[in-house]
Image: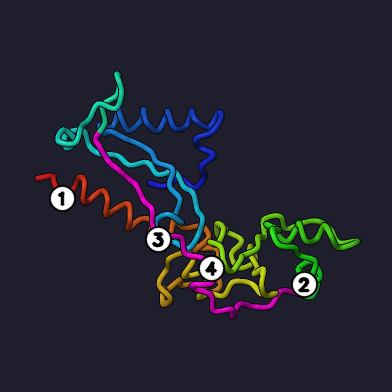
Amino acid sequence: FPVTINGLLLGEAKQYVRQIYREFDLAGYYVQHWLLDASKMGVPQRRERVFFIALRKNLAEPFLEQVDMFTVLPKLKLDFNEPEIPFNELADYEGEPISEYAKRAWNARKQGDANIAESKARVEGMKISDMNTFYVYDDKVCQTLTAKGRHGSLLFSKPIRLSKSEFCSIGSYPQDYNFTNNNQWGYLIGMSVPPVVIAQISSKIYEQWLSKIK
């Protein structure tokens, strides 16, 4: 299962990782974790997530290996090195225009700005805000889509936001996916693990474990 932040592996948060390991062990599972980046897995988005993968102990014997002096775990390689997909390979440039207020900041942008807040700092009298509204560069992989949806990003090359089609492609969703509430597509994709990421991991698990379990 995925955890949405890689901060789980830092500082005091590590205690939660230990607790996860303890609970899986008590439930009869071997568990391991990986920090994976979607942009290396065929997804046009830089999105790091921590994944915990567990295998029931009574099924694990054929795959066990000595990791170190004290640890035995079922061997599983999750190595991904797909070519990166820059935004311009999927762009349709049909997103909604930004407001005239936001455009004042956009006009002050400079190459290398990560977000519109950096551009706002150059406009006299403009409040510096929206640090979480990042720029999407044509020749680079898109940054992590967030729960802010379409309002969490805008193009560096044009004063428009991401279109629904672009959002779906960046999130690796089918263009005809039924989001039920059509106004929530940006939020839902921003909150989701990209389907292609799950497919890539599932394929590795099947190839290395499930296909060999009789």
Of mark 2 and mark 1, the one earlier in the sequence is: 2
Number of marks in the rendered image: 4
Q: Amino acid at mark 3?
A: Gly
* The C terminus: image quadrant: top left
Q: Amino acid at mark 2?
A: Lys
Dominant secondary structure, magenta:
loop
Give neighbour class at mark 3: few <14, some 14-19, many 20+ (Cα, 10 Å): some
Q: Is residue 188 above or below residue 95?
A: above
Of mark 4 and mark 3, the one earlier in the sequence is: 3
**Is residue 76 one of those drawn in magenta?**
yes
Label 1 to label 3: alpha-carbon separation: 23 Å
Label 2 to label 4: alpha-carbon separation: 21 Å
Label 4 to label 1: alpha-carbon separation: 36 Å
Give neighbour class at mark 2: few <14, some 14-19, many 20+ (Cα, 10 Å): some
Q: Amino acid at mark 1?
A: Ser
Q: Secondary structure at mark 4?
A: helix
Q: Secondary structure at mark 1?
A: helix
Looking at the rendered image, the disc whose residue lies closer to the viewer, 2 or 4, is: 4
Q: Amino acid at mark 4?
A: Phe
Residue 185 screen position, x and y as percent: 52, 69
Q: Residue at x 52, y 45 (%)?
A: 5
Q: Secondary structure at mark 2?
A: helix
Q: Residue at x 41, y 77 (%)?
A: 176
Disc 3 designates what residue?
A: 42
Of mark 2 and mark 4, the one earlier in the sequence is: 4
Label 4 to label 3: alpha-carbon separation: 13 Å
Disc 1 designates what residue?
A: 211
Which range of residues does the magenta coloring cover? 74-99
Give neighbour class at mark 4: few <14, some 14-19, many 20+ (Cα, 10 Å): many
Viewer-closest of 205 and 119: 119
Label 2 to label 1: alpha-carbon separation: 54 Å
Disc 2 designates what residue?
A: 103
